[in-house]
Image (cartoon, rainbow, N blue to C red):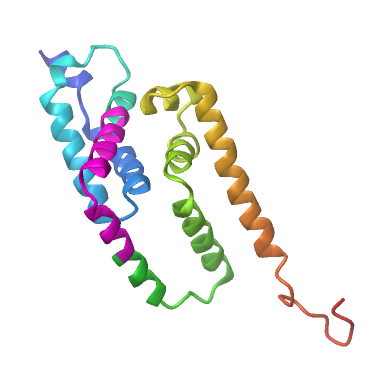
């Protein structure tokens, strides 16, 4: 019985689950609700977990499916996202360049399409292999790789655009052209 409890110890996975939920839900309150709902489902279905299987991937799959079910069932999510967006637009931008850049990267990441954001988060943030991430999302590896590639290309394009702003830096006593 003790070995069964150890193999189903989800406490060590909470940080990863919260990060992934934050990536999916786009706000902390909904992310915590999503983790809670997923853990309740995991606990209710704990007897279906195969001993020796990858608990983290199993929990990611439950979290992902819980998120998808919630999006399909509740159009209220759109209203919460719009309200959160309206609040963030009123915030004053930080003065430090690195903080501003990090904020831009975060905003660009959150603006990625849902499927690309999910794939990139699992591979880049959670450090899952392509196969593990594909299994957690229930998609073929090639599809996952394509989503990650498109997400990285979008973020790279944003970074290149931000460094090419006209008039960003000017030469003193020289021509700007």
Residue at image coords 89%, 82%: 175
When asked about the image quadrant of residue 20, the answer is top left
Residue at image coords 35%, 45%: 24
When asked about the image quadrant of residue 53, the answer is top left
| Left or right: residue 127 compared with residue 81 | right
Residue at image coords 26%, 29%: 62
| Left or right: residue 124 compared with residue 30 | right
Q: Please give the range of residues in magenta.
A: 60-82
Nearer to me, 16 or 139: 139
On screen, 5 above or below 99? above
| Number of disc labels | 0
Nearer to me, 137 or 6: 137
Residue at image coords 53%, 57%: 105
| Left or right: residue 142 compared with residue 82 | right
Q: Main secondary structure of the magenta part?
A: helix
Identify the residue at the far right of this view: 174
Q: In x, y percent, where is residue 89? A: 41, 73
Identify the residue at the far bottom of this view: 173
On screen, 86 above or below 146? below
| Left or right: residue 167 compared with residue 72 | right
On screen, 165 above or below 27? below
Q: In x, y percent, where is residue 12? A: 27, 33
Q: In x, y percent, where is residue 16? A: 34, 38
When asked about the image quadrant of residue 152, the answer is top right
């Amino acid at each position: 019985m003790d070995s069964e409890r150890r193999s189903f110890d989800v406490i060590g996975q909470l940080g990863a689950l919260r990060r992934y939920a934050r990536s999916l839900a786009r706000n902390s309150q909904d992310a915590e609700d999503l983790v809670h709902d997923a853990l309740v489902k995991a606990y209710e279905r704990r007897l279906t977990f195969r001993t020796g299987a990858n608990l983290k991937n199993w929990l990611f799959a439950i979290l992902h499916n819980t998120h998808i079910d919630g999006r399909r069932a509740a159009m209220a999510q759109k209203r919460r996202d719009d309200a959160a967006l309206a609040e963030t637009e009123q915030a004053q931008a930080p003065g430090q360049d690195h903080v501003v850049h990090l904020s831009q990267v975060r905003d660009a990441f959150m603006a990625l399409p849902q499927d690309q954001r999910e794939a990139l988060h699992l591979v880049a943030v959670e450090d899952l292999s392509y196969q593990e991430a594909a299994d957690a999302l229930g998609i073929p590896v090639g599809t996952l790789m394509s989503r990650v590639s498109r997400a990285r290309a979008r973020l790279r394009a944003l970074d290149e655009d931000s460094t090419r702003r006209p008039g960003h830096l000017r030469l003193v006593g020289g021509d700007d052209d």
